[in-house]
Amino acid sequence: MQKTAVLCGCGSMAKGWLKAIADHEDLASRVRIVGLVDLDLANARRLAEDCGLGDVPTFTDLDQALSELKPDFLFDIVIPVARPAVVETGLNHGCHVLSEKPMANSLDESRSLIEKASAAGRVHAIVQNRRYIQGVRRLRAFIGSGAIGELTGLHADFFIGAHFGGFREDMDNVLLLDMAIHTFDAARFMSGKVPEAVYCHETNPRGSWYRTGASAFAIFEMSDGVRFTYQGSWCAEGANTSWESAWRITGSKGTVLWDGLDDFRAHRVAADEGFLRDQEAIEVPEAADLSETEGHASVIRAFLNAIENGAAPETRAEDNIRSLAMVMGAIESARTGQRVMIREG
């Protein structure tokens, strides 16, 4: 049976959500957008026209839209500072809610939303879409196979000169809060380890077009002695990495490199003697389930499955808060100059 949804926040990000639904028959047959909400009504009408939604009703007031349309769920794509009020409004109207990341601007706000969703008996999940790409799924399975021995470290480089304009260029901690959460979440997901502490240094390099916080360097202490290091910049011109970062993952018997695109290179030791031991190349198998490698579509699919049959979505708020805790810990460390213990949930 087709479910109905209201989408709140009709900026450029909304097009990616709607395209994911339109491009996948199984989603298009299960979801019908019955209303669009934006503080600027022209944005809502423009989105409806651009995405072929015809004369779908448009609103500037979310409470009014939900009262009139009574949808099954709410797509929340508003700017982070507005998210808690939007999610709470959706829950108060009995909606399941799928939110853009970050799930909130603080851990206290996140905990409050989790409690409210639990009390309402509704699913609240986060679009952590980059977890659902083939490379991330491949590396999680590869690490888990033991092909390079016991995991010892994950190291990610992210350097992109991104000229967004708009609200991002005025955000506090813009790289850590708006983008690094993808890389932090991927490290947590691929490793299966729990983040325990972090030391982070944040800068705003000369020539940055962001107000503050366009670059950051972090060392995370993970469970079982694993270390995750991150160095990144959103104002690095000239040699962009991929949006997924460039990765080096080390184990007790070998290393795998991933450029964030299609290049995987893995080697492990093939001898017991020598100053530099002989190496052998090993294959990184492709992801087993390609339906889990479709970004936004995979997140939306898991959200629908949770609503329909109770299967907990992978990016449910109760889990995603652990990735947000990495971000908040890094921000606190950057602010204080101290190593910070990471508090979950």
Image (cartoon, helix red, strand yellow):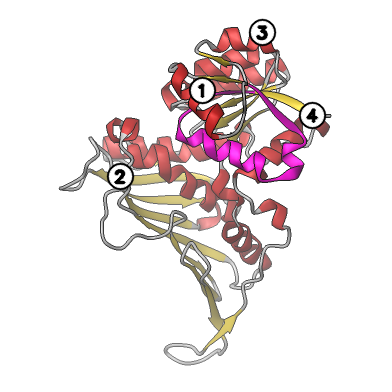
The image position of residue 15, as x and y in percent, is: 53, 37
The image position of residue 138, as x and y in percent, is: 62, 63
Dot 1 or dot 3, earlier in sequence: 1
262 to the left or right of 329: right
Residue assigned mark 3: 68
Number of the label disc, if any, that sits on residue 163: 2
* Viewer-nearest residue: 269 or 284: 284
Proximity of marks 4 and 3: CB atoms separated by less than 8 Å: no
Secondary structure, mark 2, is loop
Image quadrant containing the N terminus? top right
Q: Which residues are magenta?
A: 6-34
Dot 4 or dot 3, earlier in sequence: 4
Dot 1 or dot 2, earlier in sequence: 1
**Residue 103, above or below 159:** above
Image quadrant containing the C terminus? top right
Distance between the alpha carbons at the discs numbered 2 and 4? 39 Å
User: Mark 1: few, some, or many residues within 10 Å (few <14, many ≥20)?
Assistant: many
User: Mark 4: few, some, or many residues within 10 Å (few <14, many ≥20)?
Assistant: few
Number of the label disc, if any, that sits on residue 45: 1
* Viewer-nearest residue: 242 or 216: 242
**Residue 109, above or below 339:** above
Is any part of residue 133 visible from this angle? yes
